């Protein structure tokens, strides 16, 4: 499991772990049923406080992405989760947020942005048919 | 025992210079406690009070519930202390140093000491003063860890050291905390290191505590916010939530404290809207607090 921590990023470290595990699961690089490293092992590897890793695991468990098995450890959830879809939505949401921020700075209304998106979609389809 | 260190109303003057001003500090057992502040802010003075090498002029200091000045034996034997200026006996060999330390501490764990020595790759026969700066720092860390102290106290442990040694020090902090119930206090100016390992952070500025609390809380109440004003302004109005302004015309970026709702309310009262709000790194927070005139 490859996780990279950037402490100067501003995003709390537990959240960086949560997000990266979510992406690893969404992209299939962490498979259902796969075992997660024990808290201490991951804390040691990432050089972060074990409490931070524990918090990330708790959040992931609450979100249904991993599950604790009694005495055995923590595993990626096996019951097919709707995660992949919700993660895709999240990625698009970030794009939309950037677009909206730029539109606001250029004094475009939301309706104008929507119209522009529809227009571009129409243009792209038209050019694809040619 | 809940708190390893309890300090209240601590004030310290050196001649007419106030080094610590009414400091209150509580360090819960089992936490990693980061102490940050500019050079000369009072971090080392505070640490010296915890060690009992300075006596409180006003206020009280309790470590493990004990006054460290009145009963140093029962306090110092339970603290592992590493400072920037290592005071290891320079003329001893590493082997002699380890035997010397073992004589001092009942809880010295020889097999742990030996495994640390091998991990750190320190030569038993080398003389302390001939060790490189990095190896000397590792030797200091070894002697502080090998008796498994209840409190590990590190004063700028990473100062002037290369990244590999700093990594060893951080790994030692993490292993210490992973052992149930043990506590770490460390002062550092390397904020990314503090952010990695600390549960609690206290910032000192000119002898006063600027903020103190769980790192997560501090990060949740500090953010970088861009505002857009209805009309261009030369200087944005002062606001209790704003630490520091930057920008020009209609667009200004501020470093804000408080909840997002409070910042939003402040924006409305200033005639501005929030364009973006982003969480800040501890480094950003430190700079904003250090340069703020408050």
Image (cartoon, coloured by chain):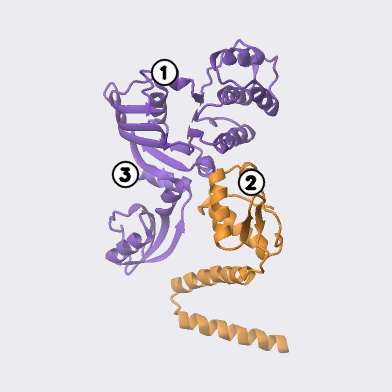
Which residue is rendered at x = 39% and y = 18% of the image? B71
Q: Establish if B152 lies above or below B238.
A: above
Which residue is rendered at x = 69% and y = 86% of the image? A127
Colour purple belongs to chain: B
Query: Could you tell me residue B152's position as x and y percent?
Result: 51, 29
Element on which disc 1 rests: helix
**What is the crowding at mark 1: few (fewer than 14 residues within 10 Å), some, or many (at least 20)?**
some
Chain of the residue that carries numbered disc 1 in the rendered image: B
When asked about the image quadrant of residue A29, the answer is: bottom right
Q: Establish if B126 lies above or below A12.
A: above
Which residue is rendered at x = 34% and y = 32% of the image? B7
Front one among B35 and A1: A1
Rendered-image quadrant of the C terminus of chain A: bottom right
Q: Colour of chain A?
A: orange
Query: Could you tell me residue B74's position as x and y percent?
Result: 44, 20
The residue that label 2 is drawn on is A42
Chain of the residue that carries numbered disc 3 in the rendered image: B
Query: Could you tell me residue B96's position as x and y percent?
Result: 64, 12
Front one among B177 and B230: B177
- CA distance for labels 2 and 1: 38 Å
Visible residue check, residue A125: yes
| Labelled disc at residue B293 | 3
The residue that label 1 is drawn on is B72
């Amino acid at each position: 499991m490859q996780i990279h921590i950037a402490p100067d990023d501003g995003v709390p470290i537990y959240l960086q772990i949560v997000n990266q595990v979510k992406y690893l699961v969404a992209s299939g690089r962490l498979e259902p049923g796969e075992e997660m490293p024990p808290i201490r092992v991951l804390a040691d590897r990432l050089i972060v406080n074990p409490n931070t890793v524990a918090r990330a695991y708790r959040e992931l468990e609450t979100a249904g992405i991993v599950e604790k098995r009694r005495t055995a450890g923590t595993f990626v959830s096996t019951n097919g989760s709707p995660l992949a879809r919700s993660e895709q939505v999240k990625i698009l949401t970030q794009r939309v947020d950037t677009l909206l921020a730029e539109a606001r700075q250029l004094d475009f209304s939301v309706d104008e942005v929507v119209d522009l998106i529809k227009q571009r979609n129409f243009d792209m389809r038209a050019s694809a048919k040619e | 025992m809940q708190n390893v260190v309890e300090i209240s109303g601590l004030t310290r003057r050196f001649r007419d210079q106030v080094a610590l001003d009414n400091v209150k500090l509580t360090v819960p057992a089992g936490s990693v406690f980061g102490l940050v502040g500019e050079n000369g802010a009072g971090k080392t003075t505070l640490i010296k009070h915890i060690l009992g090498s300075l006596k409180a002029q006003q206020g009280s200091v309790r470590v493990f519930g004990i006054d460290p000045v009145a009963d140093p034996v029962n306090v110092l034997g339970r603290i592992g202390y590493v400072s920037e200026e290592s005071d290891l006996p320079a003329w001893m060999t590493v082997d002699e140093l380890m035997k010397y330390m073992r004589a001092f501490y009942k809880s010295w764990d020889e097999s742990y000491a030996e495994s640390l020595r091998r991990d750190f790759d320190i030569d038993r026969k080398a003389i302390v003063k001939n060790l490189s700066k990095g190896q000397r720092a590792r030797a200091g860390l070894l002697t502080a860890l090998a008796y498994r102290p209840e409190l590990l106290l590190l004063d700028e442990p990473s100062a002037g050291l290369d990244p590999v040694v700093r990594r060893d020090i951080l790994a030692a902090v993490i292993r210490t905390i992973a052992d149930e119930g043990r506590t770490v206090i460390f002062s550092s100016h390397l904020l990314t290191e503090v952010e990695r390992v600390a549960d609690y952070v206290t910032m000192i500025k000119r002898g006063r505590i600027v903020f103190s609390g769980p790192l997560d809380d501090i990060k949740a109440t500090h953010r970088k916010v861009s505002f857009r004003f209805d009309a261009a302004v030369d200087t944005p109005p002062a606001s209790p939530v704003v630490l520091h302004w930057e920008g020009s015309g209609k667009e200004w970026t501020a470093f804000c404290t408080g909840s997002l709702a409070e910042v939003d309310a402040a924006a409305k009262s200033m005639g501005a809207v929030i364009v973006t709000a982003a969480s800040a790194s501890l480094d950003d927070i430190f700079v904003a607090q250090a340069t703020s005139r408050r």
